[in-house]
């Protein structure tokens, strides 16, 4: 029952959090008519975990995941309240408040994401942790897919302030559900932050499969940035889709990631985990390159669905593998590294793909990223001996 309550809390927070993420971009464009402000708000929401994630990991291992999680969720609540006020004022006078609110949301993500992952060890025994993590990741993907749908429906029916109000309510409920959550924690020695991270890296060095799983995550998230930045251009310029069709095409990403999370639950005991991760990564890279070449709408949809489904499987297996192999004493820090990777690599890959597309063409940008993707995946497949030896949960 406690695990179900935790999942429910996670689901409410994921939906609300992604609603605020999308609001940061979409409201900036709708109310301020400024791509610059949209970019700043996006950066505050998605970029700050790169900074605060290092603090988050150390604090989770020092003070317990539950304490960090409950404290960090107040930043989500403050962000929702700030956006509500900003949306209630005249647009010109609310820009600063809106950006500060976006920053609050970003700070929350930096702490909440690794804290929730680290909390799972409080709810299940070690041998059940991989399965619980796959379920958790499925909720992440469902929240990611549902948030823009709920947001657009809410804006159309009630206006922007109701989006912020809905997010506020969901965050409050999510936090209330965690009040009686388990909090078994043995505090590690309180040292200088840099010293604690050195200890973490020393522990990781003793378990090479952790480092190789994190490297696999870096490869996997190379796919996400280009998909968000380049695929809208593929849909419009290469496939000739109108706005409605473009929305449906891009909607395949969220649907396929969810399908991948479901598939991971089915296949986790039927494939060799480590080799399966590297092979699926190579297939994802191949699919990304093909999308840059294909001009047939239905074939592009098929390749997109297959590639992102495989990506959903890979991400779920990587997260589950990290949970299985990471010692509890450094779990918070390892999960924060994973969170930083998911944010930083996606952002940098998207930025690089956009710059290449601007300087040459959309297909060339996808070919370059796909070539890098395939090269790194092939290298990991050949050199990642610890990962190749990871066969079963």
Image (tube, rainbow, N blue to C red):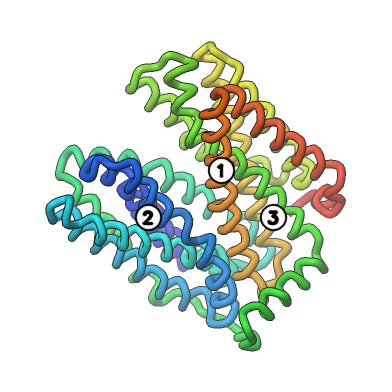
**Which picture quadrant has residue 142?**
top left
| Residue placed under numbered mark 3 in the picture | 214
Provide the secondary structure element on which disc 3 rests.
Answer: helix
Disc 1 packing (10 Å; few <14; some 14–19; many ≥20): many
Mark closer to the chain start, 1 or 2: 2
Label number found at residue 271: none
Q: Is residue 51 above or below residue 311?
A: below
Given residues 234 and 125, the one toward you in this image is 234
The span from disc 1 to disc 3 (Cα, nearest Å) is: 18 Å
* Dot 3 crowding, Cα within 10 Å, few <14, some 14–19, many 20+: many
Q: Is residue 366 visible?
A: yes
Residue 123 visible here: no
Lower sequence index among marks 2 and 3: 2
Placement of 306 over or under 156, stated as above or below: above
Q: How many marks?
A: 3
Q: Quadrant of the C terminus?
A: bottom right
Q: Secondary structure at mark 2?
A: helix
| Residue sitting at x 76%, y 67% | 204
Given the current orientation, which residue lies at the most extreme front position? 359
**Of residues 37 and 164, which is closer to you in this image?**
37
Contact flag, marks 1 and 3 (Cβ < 8 Å) = no
Cα separation, mark 1 vs mark 2, equals 20 Å
Image x and y of residue 156, in percent: 19, 38
Q: Residue at x 30, y 59 (%)?
A: 170
Check disc 1 and report the residue beneath it.
261
Q: In the rendering, at what x and y percent does residue 124 appear?
A: 59, 67
Q: Position of residue 187 (x, y in %)?
A: 60, 86
Mark 2: give few (<14), some (14-19) or many (20+) Cα within 10 Å.
many
Mark 1 or mark 2, whichever is nearer to me: 2
Q: Position of residue 225 (x, y in %)?
A: 54, 40
Q: Which residue is mark 2?
A: 17
């Amino acid at each position: 029952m406690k695990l179900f309550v935790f999942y429910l809390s996670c689901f409410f927070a994921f939906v609300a959090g992604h609603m605020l993420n999308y609001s940061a971009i979409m409201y900036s464009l709708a109310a301020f008519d400024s791509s610059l402000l949209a970019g700043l708000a996006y950066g505050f929401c998605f970029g700050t975990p790169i900074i605060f994630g290092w603090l988050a990991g150390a604090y989770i291992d020092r003070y317990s995941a539950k304490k960090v999680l409950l404290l960090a969720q107040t930043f989500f609540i403050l962000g929702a309240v700030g956006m509500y006020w900003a949306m209630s004022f005249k647009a010109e006078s609310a820009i600063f408040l809106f950006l500060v609110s976006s920053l609050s949301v970003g700070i929350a993500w930096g702490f909440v994401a690794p804290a929730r992952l680290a909390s799972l060890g409080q709810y299940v025994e070690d041998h059940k942790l991989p399965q619980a993590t796959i379920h958790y990741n499925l909720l992440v993907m469902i929240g990611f897919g549902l948030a823009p749908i709920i947001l657009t429906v809410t804006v159309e029916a009630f206006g922007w302030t109701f989006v912020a109000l809905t997010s506020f309510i969901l965050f409050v409920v999510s936090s209330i559900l965690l009040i009686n959550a388990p909090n078994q924690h043995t505090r590690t020695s309180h040292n200088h932050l840099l010293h604690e991270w050195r200890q973490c890296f020393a522990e990781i060095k003793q378990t090479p499969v952790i480092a190789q799983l994190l490297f696999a995550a870096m490869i996997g998230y190379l796919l996400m940035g280009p998909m968000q930045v380049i695929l809208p251009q593929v849909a419009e310029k290469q496939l000739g889709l109108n706005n409605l069709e473009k929305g449906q095409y891009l909607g395949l990403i969220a649907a396929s990631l969810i399908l991948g999370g479901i598939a991971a639950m089915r296949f986790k005991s039927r494939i060799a985990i480590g080799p399966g991760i590297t092979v699926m990564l190579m297939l994802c890279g191949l699919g990304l390159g093909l999308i840059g070449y294909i001009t047939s709408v239905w074939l592009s949809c098929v390749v997109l669905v297959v590639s992102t489904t495989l990506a959903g499987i890979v991400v779920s297996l990587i997260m589950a593998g990290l949970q299985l192999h990471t010692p509890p004493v450094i779990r918070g820090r390892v999960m924060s590294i994973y969170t930083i990777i998911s944010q930083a690599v996606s952002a940098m890959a998207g930025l690089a793909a956009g710059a290449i597309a601007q300087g040459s063409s959309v297909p060339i940008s996808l070919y370059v990223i796909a070539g890098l993707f395939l090269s790194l995946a092939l290298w990991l497949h050949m050199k990642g001996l610890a990962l190749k030896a990871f066969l079963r949960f």
